[in-house]
Amino acid sequence: MRSSPSLGTLLEAAGRLTPLQVPQLGDAGAATVTAVAYDSRQVTPGAVFVALAGSERDGAAYVPQALERGAVAVVAALPAPADVATPWIVAPQPRRALAACAVALHGHPSDHVLLVGVTGTNGKTTSTYLLEGIFRAAGWRSGRIGTIGYRIADQERSAARTTPEAPDLQRLLREMVDLECKACAIEVSSHALDLERVAFTRFGAAIFTNLTRDHLDYHGDMENYFAAKRRLFEMLPPEATAAVNLDDPRGERLALMAARPVTYALARPADVCPLSLSLSLDGIDAEIQTPAGTLRLRTRLPGRPNAYNVLGVVSSGMSRPTHAATTPSTL
């Protein structure tokens, strides 16, 4: 179990991730940080309160409430009012600062668990359950984060949103690490990517399922929607696999920009694609070509959409070796 950092230590670590204007802290720098909060109602003694601009009101309006509840510092986009003596940190991008502080508080937990992110319009939830099933079949203690709920090892919790806000996400990942989870499957929504909820989080692999018209009330048009989804692949480390659906019109663009793409498709040649495919009410029966050889695949999940989900999950576990194995196996 990690010990809580001091305010000075936390701000130094967060400042290595995103620009922060930190005042002279003096004795306040030794204060113990117990939490990072974006809602003043959730502030507890020892919390750093990050004021976010909302659609109706600026979070800075709630600073007095946060201070009354015991916040040891405030992070905001604008300078401090003259009557505030509590350390006030100016952040040009408060949402990135929120994520940086949360990551620093919890000790970069995504560095210690294999995190597989799934993004796209359809198929995210099913894909995370498939990934979780694979982790368990491998004998790994694991986690799952998504629309239906959050799972940490054997603990199931209700989900407030598909992808949690940065402090909640980092806290969940830290719990997984402390419980010795080896992997986690997470749905990564376009809202989460646009709002920096997964900023500074390390992904071991990512899956792009598809993109259809959705959330345009928020993103405005399909290109902005795609740009939000693309951010997950832009933040992948060079060694991470990018599993990309080539049958989606935007899949080829993602594959071209990814450092380590593994493509999948039903309707065209790809790294992972069926040599034979049978779809029925009883499920899917297929022989799958992959960079690691040929897989015989059977699942009770029916329908073409689930065939894509299965191919995407298979692709996320693949790389492109120089000499692909040819030994058949069964998934």
Image (cartoon, rainbow, N blue to C red):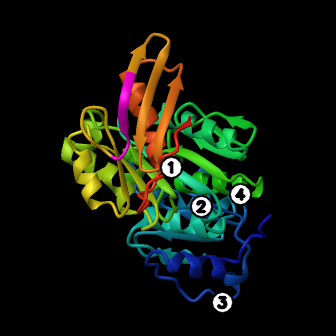
Q: CA distance from mark 3 to mark 4?
A: 33 Å
Q: Is residue 130 visible?
A: yes
Image mark for residue 317: 1
Q: CA distance from mark 1 to mark 4?
A: 21 Å
Q: Where 275 sits versus 46, above or below?
A: above
Residue annotated with mark 4 = 177
Residue annotated with mark 2 = 110
Q: Nearer the viewer, residue 68 or 20?
A: 20
The mark closer to the camera, 3 or 1, is 1
Residue, x 31% and y 32% (percent of image)? Answer: 266
Q: Which residues are magenta?
A: 271-277
Q: Nearer the viewer, residue 154 or 309?
A: 309
Q: Circle 3 — which element?
A: helix
Residue 130 falls in which quadrant of the image?
top right
The mark closer to the camera, 2 or 1, is 1
Whichever of labels 2 and 1 marks the residue nearer the N terminus, that label is 2
Q: Is residue 148 magenta?
A: no
Q: Is residue 275 magenta?
A: yes
Disc 4 residue type? Val
